[in-house]
Amino acid sequence: MSSGVGISVYLDTAACVMPTPKQFELPGGGQLHYLEQGQGQLVLLLHGGMGDCFSWSPQIDAMAADFHVISYSRYASYPNQNPPRQATHPIILDVADLTAFHDGVQRGAANLVGVSYGALLALLYARQHPEKILSLTLVEPPLHQWACRAPAASSPRASAASSAPA
């Protein structure tokens, strides 16, 4: 027996077309795919753990009117097809890749915007290369282990606890 309820879905396929990313060859082998749009001050967008260069597509379109916007896929992220590499601390390799990419694609200072793992990557890159940074926007960097090791008097937990109403 039919309930008589129907669902009609309209999909604008033109809006679903993904742009073709450019490719950057890493000096040590492998490649990074990236999207680039706009002119002006550089904004580098760094995706989270399961993201890729396409994760930032809506933001790229919005920001490109005022900025030179680049979003790249990290070494092991889609659509890159690089061989696996072994590392005790993969973030160190990601910082090295970001350094090579930033130097190779645009040598000027940049505004870094990172979410989750991308925020941690931005933070570590900025510590190593402060001269290449105009600003940092960090959204939910995974700093839990750091916060747990911070001295009690200066830890975020202690600060929050001391300012909470009784």
Image (cartoon, rainbow, N blue to C red):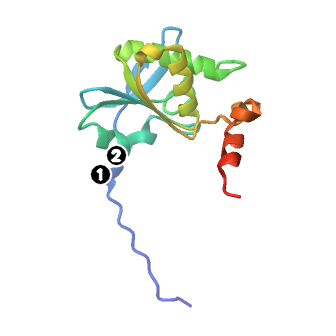
Q: Position of residue 133 (x, y in %)?
A: 42, 21
In depth, the one of 133 and 154 nearer the eye is 154
Instruction: Relative to 149, say whether 159 is above or below.
Output: below
In the rendered image, the quadrant that contains the N terminus is bottom right
Res 161 visible: yes
Q: Residue 67's mark?
A: none
Q: CA distance from mark 1 to mark 2?
A: 6 Å
Quadrant assignment, res 92: top right
Q: Residue 14's mark?
A: 1
Q: Position of residue 17 (x, y in %)?
A: 34, 46
In depth, the one of 54 and 66 nearer the eye is 66
In depth, the one of 103 and 1 nearer the eye is 103
Q: Are marks 1 and 2 in contact (CB under 8 Å)?
A: yes
Describe the element under mark 1 as helix, strand or loop.
helix
Describe the element under mark 2 as helix, strand or loop.
loop
Res 25 visible: no
Category of crowding for the residue at label 1, using alpha-carbon neighbours closer than 10 angstroms: few (below 14), some (14–19), many (at least 20): few
Residue found 34% across the figure and 17% down from its top: 106
Q: Position of residue 139 (x, y in %)?
A: 52, 40
Q: Is residue 90 left or right of residue 74?
A: right
Residue at the disc numbered 2 = 17
Name the kind of residue labelled 2 in the image.
Answer: Val
Query: Which residue appears farthest toward the bottom when viewing the image?
Result: 1
Q: Is residue 33 left or right of residue 96?
A: left
Residue found 25% across the figure and 27% down from its top: 40
In depth, the one of 156 and 82 nearer the eye is 156
